[in-house]
Amino acid sequence: MLVFHLLLIIFEEVNTKPLILSIESSCDDTSVAILKGRKVLSNIVSTQKVHKDFGGVVPELASRAHQKNIVPTVDVAVKTAGIKLAELDAIAFTVGPGLLGSLLVGVSFAKSMALGLGIPLITVNHMEAHILAHFIDSDKQAPSFPFICLTVSGGHTQLVEVKSPYQFEIHGETIDDAAGEAFDKIAKIMGLPYPGGPVLDKLAQDGNPLAFKFSLPKVGNYDYSFSGLKTSVLYFLQKEMKLNSAFIEENKNDLCASVQKAILDVLFVKLDLLVEELGIKQIAVAGGVSANSGLRSRLETKRKVGWSVYLPDFEYCTDNAAMIGIGGYYKFLKQDFAEISIAAQARLKITK
């Protein structure tokens, strides 16, 4: 039955290439993309810099910035794609999960635009879109079904078994902080600039990952926890700073390398176990943290033991509307359209 379903998808892909405008506004980036089938014609991201002074995303400021950015971002996306609004077949948008105020801006705009153009609405789950970003038409090879996806971002960490573009099964997820959140919060504790994750990664490349050891959380099954690790680092630094106020500055590279190793150890222990249990060695990685150099290095070592590893192009790793567009594309194939009464859902789960 599954084979028949996948063959049907392939047939529909060959014969259906809708023109879809997609909107992503789940957090602090306003993004609009236009896809023709699985091909990206434009993918515009307007980044909000207002949060830098606060060391993290401020929800109220984020929603206000989305209101300011959404119209010009749509305009640039349409002009870059070289299309006319009247040519669009559907509007896809992030319905959740995310910051409610930010989601409301995208949802409201998508509804208004669809009504004005008289075309269907398509809701897309933000987390499913991260996974489906692997199927955007590009030079990158896409995984075949079934595969395991490790989704690691600032707000989410999940281990998902992907059986088709419509079938996802979560085997584990974070019960508190996400991996990306742990990177950013520890970077903030160390006084690194925001966003701290990429800065920590860069410093770690010149450090010794074995210089310092931090206690790793123990959580049952395939779930993750990073809040305890963050606290362990905080207490360690407080203790050392009392003895030497310049401790962080003098050991910055080694601290970053040791923190990065600890976070990656947590991620890979569970991933290794799931690969062994399911017997699936096709591994995809999605989300902003997939750009981390340490993570990519570890994945390269896994290729040597028989894993097939897949990473989307960097521009599709972080929050962007192209990934929403590919999610919308697969729903369009099924004619799975939303009612105009649909509401944003801040805590939306992946559907099985």
Image: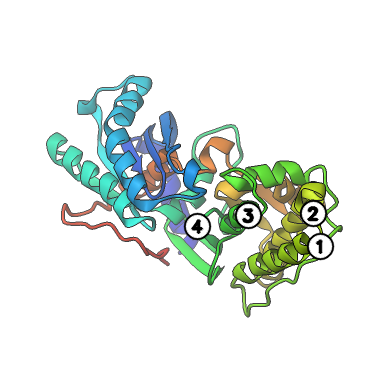
Asked if disc 2 and disc 4 are in contact, CB closer than 8 Å, the reply is no
Q: Is residue 33 left or right of residue 52?
A: left
Asked if disc 4 and disc 1 are in contact, CB closer than 8 Å, the reply is no
Q: Secondary structure at mark 2?
A: helix
Q: Nearer the viewer, residue 296 or 71?
A: 71
- Residue at point 23%, 27% (across, down): 85
| Circle 3: residue type | Phe
Label 1 to label 3: alpha-carbon separation:
25 Å
Q: Which residue is mark 2?
A: 247
- Residue at point 79%, 54% (across, down): 247
Label 4 to label 1: alpha-carbon separation:
35 Å
- 231 w.r.t. 293: above or below: below
Label 2 to label 4: alpha-carbon separation:
30 Å
Residue 79 point in image, percent of width and height = 32, 20
- Mark 4, Cα crowd under 10 Å, few <14 / some 14-19 / many 20+, is some
Label 3 to label 4: alpha-carbon separation:
11 Å
Q: Which residue is mark 3?
A: 183
**Quarter the C terminus occupies:** bottom left
Q: Which mark is residue 348?
A: none
Label 2 to label 1: alpha-carbon separation:
8 Å
Name which of mark 2 and mark 3 comes first in the sequence: 3
Asked if disc 2 and disc 1 are in contact, CB closer than 8 Å, the reply is yes
Residue 198 point in image, percent of width and height = 64, 43
Q: Which residue is mark 1?
A: 243
Q: Which residue is mark 4?
A: 155
Name which of mark 2 and mark 4 comes first in the sequence: 4
